[in-house]
Amino acid sequence: MQTLQLKTNPTCPDTEVCERAGALLRKGKLVAIPTETVYGLAANALDEAAVHSIFVAKGRPQDNPLIVHLPSPDWLPHYTPKIPEAAQKLVDAFWPGPLTIVLEKGGKIASAVSAGLPTVGFRCPSHPVASAIIQAAGIPLAAPSANRSGRPSPTEAAHVLLDLDGQIDAIVDAGPCSVGVESTVVSLHHGIPHILRPGGITPDQLRGVLGAVEVDPAVLQGLAKDAKAASPGMKYKHYAPKANVTIIKGSLDTFIQYVRSQPQNETYALCFEGEQQKIGLPCVTYGTANDPASQARELFGALRTLDKKGAQTVFARSPSEDEMGLAVYNRLLRAAGFSVIS
Ligand code: TXA
Ligand code: MG
């Protein structure tokens, strides 16, 4: 199959492009679309066969559910039977934006979307092109990140094409994504609201609206072999470049001492802007040391750059684990297969 490539301005969506994408989606086709977090691989969330083809194109495990994207909050009551008060507060505060809320599944949503769970994650993206495409399609869109399963999420159209060219019907290119890590996933089914995946909305932002919020332990730890995942996505190796990645906690000096003591074999440092000279090893940077938002924007692209350079061994500087840094650290931990040296 040839993948149709469409381009649009990110802030002022091209109507013709959005309508073409919308028409393909209505016909059950797969279209990669830009969102403020990462590119998503979209299909009609009401069409069982279309949703199934997402899993095939990505090589995604069948038990890992998808997020349903809506163009505006007023669509939500059509697709879930119940909107708890806490959920409504989150919708009012953070939609449109990088927050996914896990709610009861309404009957119209295809069962493949929720992978058999009684719940569905809903999100209303703030990217003008994403909203315009969903509006044009006139249907809710199921969309995981548009990467091959296990690879870093795509923050540019080129990343999507590297993984999926020829396996999806179309891609709408609107340039780089502004957040760069995926949405925060929140569940209200655990008593105290639970963060199943940290992302573009920080724990403190959520606490500001809901009061107490817990971060699921699996965010910072590998799941025990037989443990049940609150969110199936927690179980899988994720964001992995081909190299072996190890996170080194501590100061830049500690980092330099450690990496210089190691045997060098296509070894790279994954570090912050401005540290390259001091480290004296081949380096790829991801943002600046005190700016987690810049780290979020650049991390996935940096992991792909390391692959392109043929890195075998990567030592990574550790981000802070606070606020937006928690999402960055969570992705880096999974890219490193939880290999951390303190
Ligand atoms: O920012 C994002 O969320 C992007 C863009 C495209 O919107 N999408 C995205 O989708 O990251 P995906 O499929 O790569 O990640 C969805 C995550 C997975 O970890 C999945 O297990 C979890 O959300 N999830 C989805 N539905 C769930 C549910 N009903 N209960 C618990 N976790 C759920
Ligand atoms: Mg993903």
Image (cartoon, grey):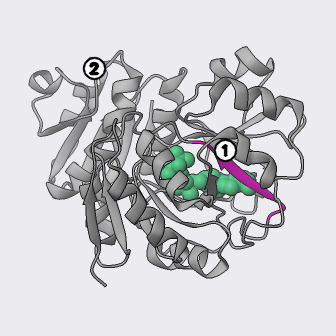
Q: Nearer the viewer, residue 339 or 332?
A: 332
Horizontally, residue 207 falls left or right of residue 21, namely right
Q: Quadrant of residue 110?
A: bottom right
Tell me what residue is drawn at x 45 percent, y 76 percent.
57
Residue 231 visible somewhere in the drawing: no
| Three-letter amino acid code at the position of disc 1 | Ala
Most prominent secondary structure in the magenta stretch?
strand
Q: Is residue 136 left or right of residue 256?
A: right
Quadrant where the C terminus sits is: top left
Look at mark 2 in the image and give the residue it sits on.
Answer: 252
| Range covered by the magenta-colored residues | 117-124
Q: Looking at this view, is 251 or 171 the one in front?
A: 171
Decide if residue 269 is in sight here: yes
Residue 204 place in picture, x, y as percent:
65, 18
- Compared with 45, 80 (above or below) is above
Q: Of helix, strand and loop, which one carries label 2?
A: helix
**Residue 115 rendering spot, x and y as whole percentages:** 72, 69
The amino acid at mark 2 is Leu
